[in-house]
Amino acid sequence: MASVDLDHVTKDFPDGTRAVDEIELAIADGEFMIFVGPSGCGKTTALRMVAGLEKVSSGEIRIGGVAVNDLDPVERDIAMVFQNYALYPHMTVRDNISFPLKMQGVGRRESNGRVNDAARLLGIEELLHRKPRELSGGQRQRVAMGRAIVRHPQAFLMDEPLSNLDAKLRVQMRAELVKLHARLGVTTIYVTHDQTEAMTLGQRVAVLSKGVVQQVDTPQRLYSRPTNTFVASFIGSPAMNFLRGRAVRGELELGDRRFELPAEVRDEIERERGDVLVGLRPEAFADALLAGTDERPRLHADVEITEQLGPETLAYVRIPGFETMELGERPVELAGALAARLDPRTRARPGETVELALDLEQVHLFDRETGASLLR
């Protein structure tokens, strides 16, 4: 096991594209780190540079404190798990798992012992005699993991390893990966575009956009304290709602309404702030009829559509006078609508008006020009 450090790492391709821009990141020994972001953000390129599959244009990568820029992949003592499993179809599961040990010259007795240990850990002992074509997608993924485990590497590098699995199996494999990491304690860098995977797997998550690390933090901090509008819009589903507003002398102006900001928010922003971008998660709204007699301000909203999801109802609403901004991904027909996560007992129905209670304790404020958070 070893730490992995990216010290101002940059990758420029021959056509002038800068895929990774000055990444500075320290991954602790034994940590499970996630690289997450939309397609083309540089996360896979960063992983491939750590693996040695892409040359670093500038900066330094260190594994276990040793600079590896000039080392070939085989010399870096890492194991990589790919999206497509990369299994040899003509080999049995045992031979697939033991193949890297054969390349390292490990003796048959030790190799068999390592393969058996990995198979037992992954619950695939009864599959060792089979060929990949006889396995399900989840079983093939376990075999690919077994091939990585037997090497006893300093670090695991995983490039969207669950993306080919169906939704139910992805949930199962996420849980198994968490348990596996807890048992092995090997430093792991995991690349995904799926924010659910990022939030459920990572001890820390690095959010990338256009080759730049936007924020590195725990999943909960990313959700509750995003550093800018990109992180706020990317993390969370449905995406955070954004509205144009003004923060003036401890009050928040939205359209023709004024609300008193919570004390902790007032303490964190300039007294005469002016124009701001207001962020509200869907759970900042509640059906007022079910919210009791608390002091939360009430808003009348026109319901466009509702989605019944069992434990909750998602309602997309429009509030007269509120000026929204579309920063997250939302269907064109819902552009400008606000997402509200409501109690499943809500009586909100499409085409009707519902009274919502607004929880300003959950408000986020961003600089309208830069998108940077105004809250620490």
Image (spheres, helix red, strand yellow):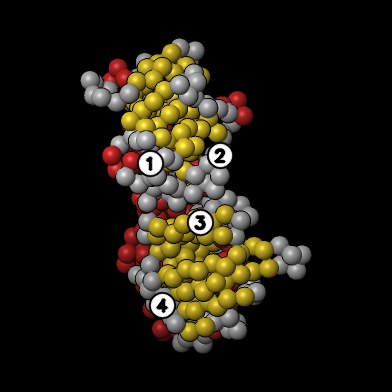
Q: Which mark is residue 327?
A: 2
Q: Which mark is residue 214?
A: 3
Q: Are marks 1 and 3 in contact (CB under 8 Å)?
A: no
Identify which residue is drawn at 47% across, 43% down. 366
- Where residue 301 sits in the image (x, y, percent)? 44, 18
72 lies left or right of 153: right
Q: Which mark is residue 2?
A: 4
- Nearer-N-terminus badge (2/3): 3
Q: Are marks 1 and 4 in contact (CB under 8 Å)?
A: no
Measure the alpha-carbon separation of dots 1 and 4. Answer: 47 Å
Q: Amino acid at mark 1?
A: Arg
- Give SS at disc 3: strand
Measure the alpha-carbon separation of dots 1 and 3. Answer: 27 Å
- Nearer-N-terminus badge (2/1): 1
Tell which residue pokes out farthest to the right in this image.
Answer: 15
Tell which residue pokes out farthest to the top in this image.
Answer: 352
Q: Which mark is residue 220?
A: none
Q: Are marks 4 and 2 in contact (CB under 8 Å)?
A: no
Which residue bears the numbered disc 1?
A: 271
Front residue of this view, candidates 254 and 48: 254
| 141 versus 312 height, above or below | below
Measure the alpha-carbon separation of dots 2 and 1. Answer: 27 Å
- Give SS at disc 4: loop
- Nearer-N-terminus badge (4/2): 4
